[in-house]
Image (spheres, rainbow, N blue to C red):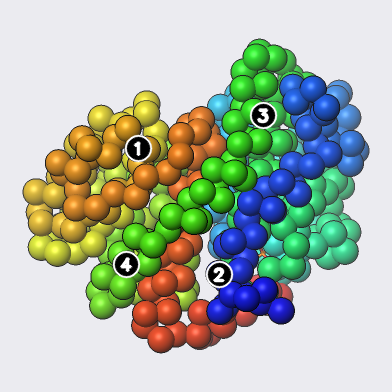
Amino acid sequence: EKGGFEHFMLKEIHEQPKAYRDTMRGRIDATGKRVILPELKLTHEQILNIRNIQIVACGTAYHAGLVGRNVIEQLVRIPVETDVASEYRYRSPIVTPETLVIVVSQSGETADTLAALREAKANGAHVLAITNVVGSSIARDADDVIATLAGPEIAVASTKAYTSQLIAFYLFGLYLAEVRGTQTPEAVTEIIQAMQELPEQLEGMLENSDSIKAYAEQIAHHEHLFFIGRGVDFAVAQEGSLKLKEISYIHSEAYPAGELKHGTLALIEEGIPVIALVTQESVYEKTVSNIKEVNARGADIMAITYEDHVSTLLKSVDQVFAIPKTLPLLTPALSVVPLQLLAYYASLARGNDVDKPRNLAKSVTVE
Ligand code: M6R
């Protein structure tokens, strides 16, 4: 049942290239130039009328929603907010019939997300669910569903569900951009082509991940560490931090790289591990100066970046894990994978129950 892997989590990490292909299949037209989402009931007229988008989810699905916000705002220029479901409901969010609410849930049964969906519907919003379980309560109650086709996810720590949620956001963002005419056809084609390369790029990364295992064993005896990044790198940092906490029980915090000096830098001392995501060219120099700030305080830094930055970055960091080149918006679909493996191997090194971490359940059906 684990397909030759020691744990479901490792199996599911390795299933991600397939999940990418399955989630994209049939949703890109034969010319490779357009996204088609025949399952949507949302009309072009409704899409043209959208004034704001609210993305609501919990945990890892919330982190996918943070990337989704960047994707939609950049491609479509519609204001997007991403909220944790248990907060969303109680802040009386401003929802109108021109609001599109997107709920994201692997299981489709998360109580807070389901309650947020019902609340949004009661306020007149159109609700789109991105879910991995088509027969779930969330899929049933939503006005529209984009199914992620990741296959059953058994490990409590979510991996392939998260990355296929990212693919769903890329597809939906491109679809909105086409309908609203906010991107040139060339820009859309370029993104689609880069998306189609992701599965193979990921396969290559999974074959060359031994250095992550060694690094995980090195950090496994630490009690605190930090993840830093900017833009979508910060969103991925938050997911990396959650993954590590939930299965290795190592305390970590994800910080926007530029925010460290507003307080958290005080915690950086000799030997503390800092994992820096450095994939966004537009803020590359700024992130490097933040790396230098922690380097100067003796942190032990591991950077996740592109091959062409490795030699320069090695002047300020101790180790580097290179990811294949892709478009800036698409990097989360690759850069999160070393963090999933890091959490996995750190958990293993600590002798924890990887697939069933203490205190947690796969599906959270209480509010
Ligand atoms: O089934 P859902 O996607 O709605 O679940 C939401 C969270 O409970 C879930 O992502 C949780 O954070 C995972 N255990 C993280 O790995």
Which comes before the other along the chain, label 3 or label 1?
3
Which residue is under mark 3?
192
| Coordinates of residue 37 in the picture (x, y in percent) | 83, 36
| Coordinates of residue 283 in the picture (x, y in percent) | 33, 30
Mark 3 is surrounded, within 10 Å at the Cα level, by few (under 14), some (14 to 19) or many (20 or more) other residues, namely: many
Q: Quadrant of residue 168?
A: top right
| Coordinates of residue 94 in the picture (x, y in percent) | 66, 42
Q: Secondary structure at mark 3?
A: helix
Which residue is under mark 2?
10
- Observer-nearest residue: 260 or 331? 331
Mark number, residue 54: none
Residue at (68%, 32%) from the top-left corner? 173
Query: In the rendered structure, which amino acid carries the disc numbered 2?
Result: Leu
Q: Is residue 222 left or right of residue 24?
A: left
Residue at (35%, 74%) from the top-left corner? 250
Q: Secondary structure at mark 4?
A: helix
Which comes before the other along the chain, label 3 or label 4?
3
Which residue is under mark 1?
307
Q: Look at the picture and state if 250 lies above or below 43.
A: below
Q: Is residue 75 left or right of residue 136?
A: left
Q: Is residue 99 left or right of residue 162?
A: right
Which residue is under mark 4?
214
